[in-house]
Image (tube, rainbow, N blue to C red):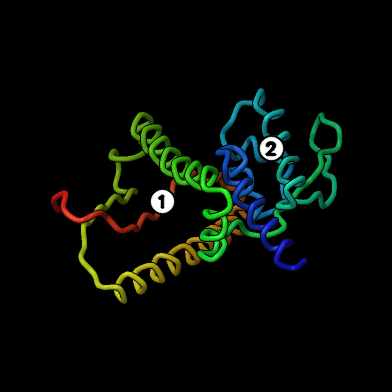
Amino acid sequence: MKNAALRDASENRMLAMSHKLRADAFAILTQRAASPSEITRELGLPTEELNKVTYHVKHLVELGCAEAVGERREHGRPPATIYKATERSIIEMGEWERFKGENPQLADHLLVEVMQTHLGDYARALEAGTVGDDENFHLTRTRRHVDLQGLIDALELKEEHRRRMDEIERESAERRAEDGSDAIHVSDFLGFFKLPPGGGG
């Protein structure tokens, strides 16, 4: 029974991330409790998108990835339901290997979705001039050669970076709650994977 519960939770976390808007809403809810309208504003979406955001937040609840924690009165509106994430959406390697074996099509879809989302973020940033027009950006792509232990060490380093970025995001959310400053939307992409032999570089 426990293994089945763990499998279901793992699949639900993956399903939560399989849609960009749902994943973006979930990312906010991992940092703080928020209503769908607050999420809509933080994502920089027009008010017409509120129904879509609400739909995906409720889907997160159905997946067990978020929960309603109360209500908040918003100016000129009926009381809004406040949600928060029940757990951070992290896919452990053991979960991924099991999921890949049980549902390879969805696993492949998620891999493609992650990269397409990253490329979409880059295209939007380039069009808006938020990358390349000032010094506040970082882009690197370095071909490296490592042994098996080096591969393992590098993957651990990437995970340390992700955890530290989680801390930075939480600290930023606390400061913004205190000073009322707007969120600066950023795309944080970590890619590290083996390449087939050859191909230059």
CB of mark 2 within 8 Å of CB of mark 1? Answer: no
Q: Is residue 59 above or below residue 5?
A: above
Work out whether residue 38 or residue 74 is closer to the camera in this orientation and state it.
Answer: 38
Mark number, residue 56: 2
Tell me which label, 2 or 1, sits earlier in the chain: 2
Residue visible at 38% across and 31% down in the picture: 128
Disc 1 crowd, CA 10 A, few/some/many (<14, 14-19, 20+): some
The residue furthest left is 200
Lateral position of residue 12 relative to residue 165, left or right: right
Amino acid type at mark 1: Phe
Work out whether residue 54 or residue 198 is closer to the camera in this orientation and state it.
Answer: 198
Mark number, residue 144: none
- Element on which disc 2 rests: helix
Residue visible at 58% across and 53% down in the picture: 102
Residue 183 lies, in percent from the top left, at 54, 46
The residue furthest bottom is 149
Amino acid type at mark 2: His
Residue 198 lies, in percent from the top left, at 16, 53
Residue 69 lies, in percent from the top left, at 82, 52
Cα–Cα span, label 2 and label 1: 23 Å
Residue 62 lies, in percent from the top left, at 77, 45
- Element on which disc 1 rests: loop
Q: Is residue 7 above or below residue 72?
A: below
Disc 2 crowd, CA 10 A, few/some/many (<14, 14-19, 20+): many
Residue visible at 63% across and 36% down in the picture: 41
Lateral position of residue 188 relative to residue 82, left or right: left
The residue furthest front is 101
Determine which residue is flagged by label 1: 189
- Image quadrant holding the N terminus, namely bottom right
Q: Is residue 12 above or below residue 39?
A: below
